[in-house]
Image (tube, helix red, strand yellow):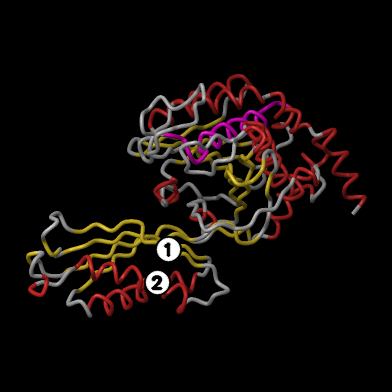
């Protein structure tokens, strides 16, 4: 163990990628602030896409790279860039998501959102900046001369929809891709630590819509109707029994009804009520039987109130699990090279969803987290909060780790585990 620590400390002192990340610190922060000020909602990020393309063109020109091929789409935002080293090898895809949320910003930052009611409250602005920083590092003359195989970069639209990645997959993004890498700025992980844990990371996501039909009547004569609001209320409570009584308690499961809408008059028995909700799990078995279970619970419950129900299940994406042994090893070793054992922190898995799992459903992948929380500076709000303001000290580390992971993966097939030669 002492030898590993000494090697990690030696590597952090001489690491070329870390040096390049530090050199590009101001650039990474400046680009993050620009994108933070100019957020766009899911599937509307056309201006963001155009700016990212301009940034990539500038990076390639500055690095003297003439073969960075950039693909945009006429009917969908986001873009794909590809660099071929000209040497045989594998292909790795590096991903950043680019969409913002319909949240009014309350951070007080000098570079706050210039679009009312829209904010990068999940940190996707930092993801754009970190991947741009990684592109600068990987295309720099010192690093790219060592590359083998191909690098692909995806700046992805619509992650917050739960299935924004599907468009690119359907259009051949993963053809001939051997592995995919992504990361997320996380509000409950202290900055500037990196989490490279293996195993379960983020849950699957399925959304549902339940339409409960009853019979309208005057509010003063409820016995002449069938109240869909009362039936819906009972259904909400009954659904919780699936979590507490039907699910194996050792399997994490969340079932949330986030919206209940019914009626438009205070004195009318409501004839139709709609429930919208989401389910999160790590169990593929549970995910596969959800619709039947929910339909049975809801239908039998509302029937007692003289009502009927329709259940519509919307499959979004599977659970995100770091289960590829080779990629897990490469990720941990890359983090140790850069920042040593003291730069790594573990964090528990979460029930939030991430459509990066649509990529890892098709090809091997790894997903990391970088810290955003800094209590001393008052940066304590979590993702999706109107005050979310990640510590920018984490950004250069995210860029460095992305670049190191990509380099190590591409060289691993030809040079084994010894890729430290790049630093000498």
Q: Which of label 2 and label 1 is nearer to you?
A: 1
Magenta stretch: helix, strand or loop mostly: helix
In front of the other: 328 or 371: 371
Decide if residue 330 is in sight here.
yes
The crowding category of the residue bearing disc 2, from other C-alpha atoms within 10 Å (few below 14, some 14 to 19, many at least 20), is: some
- Does 372 appear in magenta? no
Image height of 116 relative to 341, above or below: above
Q: Position of residue 368 (x, y in %)?
A: 63, 48
Image height of 332 relative to 209, above or below: above
Q: In which quarter of the image is residue 326?
A: bottom right
Instruction: Evaluate if marks 2 and 1 touch, with contact meaning CB atoms under 8 Å apart.
Output: yes
In front of the other: 285 or 91: 285
What is the distance, in whole Å, between disc 2 and disc 1 at their CAs?
Answer: 9 Å
Q: Name the residue at the front extreme.
A: 220
Q: Where is residue 266 in the image (x, y as percent from the top left)?
A: 14, 56
If you read the primary sequence from the N terminus, does the residue marked by circle 2 or circle 1 appear first? 1
Label placed on residue 290 = 2
Decide if residue 148 is in sight here.
no
Label 1, on which residue? Answer: 279
- Does 122 appear in magenta? yes
Give the secondary structure at mark 1. strand
Q: Position of residue 306 (x, y in %)?
A: 17, 77
- Residues rendered magenta in the picture: 119-141
Q: Which residue is drawn at 92% across and 51% down?
A: 2
Horizontal arrangement in the rendering, residue 420 relative to residue 245 (left or right): right
Q: Position of residue 77 (x, y in %)?
A: 39, 37
Q: In which quarter of the image is residue 316?
A: bottom left
Give the secondary structure at mark 2. helix
């Amino acid at each position: 163990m002492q030898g590993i620590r000494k090697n990690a400390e030696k590597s952090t002192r001489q690491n070329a990628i870390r040096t390049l990340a530090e050199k590009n610190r101001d650039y990474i922060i400046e680009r993050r602030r620009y994108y933070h000020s100019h957020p766009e909602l899911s599937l509307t990020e056309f201006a963001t896409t155009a700016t990212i393309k301009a940034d990539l063109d500038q990076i390639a020109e500055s690095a003297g790279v003439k073969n960075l091929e950039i693909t945009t789409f006429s009917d969908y935002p986001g873009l794909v860039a590809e660099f071929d080293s000209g040497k045989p090898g594998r292909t790795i895809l590096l991903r950043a998501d680019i969409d913002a949320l319909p949240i009014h910003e309350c951070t007080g930052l000098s570079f706050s959102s210039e679009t009312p009611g829209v904010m990068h409250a999940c940190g996707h602005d930092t993801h754009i900046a970190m991947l741009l920083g990684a592109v600068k590092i990987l295309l720099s003359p010192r690093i790219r001369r060592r590359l083998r195989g191909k690098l692909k970069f995806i700046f992805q639209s619509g992650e917050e929809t739960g299935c924004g990645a599907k468009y690119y997959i359907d259009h051949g993004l993963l053809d001939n891709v051997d592995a995919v890498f992504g990361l997320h700025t996380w509000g409950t992980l202290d900055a500037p630590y990196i989490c490279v844990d293996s195993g379960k990371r983020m849950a699957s996501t399925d959304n549902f819509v339940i339409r409960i039909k009853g019979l309208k009547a005057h509010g003063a004569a409820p016995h002449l109707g069938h109240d869909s609001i009362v039936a819906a209320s009972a259904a909400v409570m009954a659904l919780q029994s699936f979590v507490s009584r039907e699910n194996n308690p050792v399997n994490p499961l969340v079932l949330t009804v986030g919206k209940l809408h019914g009626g438009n008059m205070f004195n009318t028995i409501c004839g139709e009520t709609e429930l919208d909700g989401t389910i999160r799990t790590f169990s593929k078995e549970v995910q596969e039987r959800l619709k039947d279970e929910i339909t049975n619970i809801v239908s039998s419950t509302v029937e007692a109130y003289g009502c009927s129900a329709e259940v519509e299940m919307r499959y979004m994406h599977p659970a995100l699990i770091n289960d590829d042994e080779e990629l897990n090893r490469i990720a941990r070793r890359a983090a140790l090279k850069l920042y040593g054992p003291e730069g790594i922190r573990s964090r528990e898995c979460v029930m939030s969803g991430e459509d990066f799992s649509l990529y890892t459903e098709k090809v091997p992948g790894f997903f990391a987290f970088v810290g955003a929380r800094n209590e001393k500076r008052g940066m304590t709000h979590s993702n999706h909060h109107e005050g979310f303001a990640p510590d920018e000290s984490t950004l250069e580390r995210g860029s460095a780790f992305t670049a190191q992971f990509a380099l190590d993966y591409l060289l691993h097939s030809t040079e084994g585990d010894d890729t430290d030669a790049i630093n000498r």
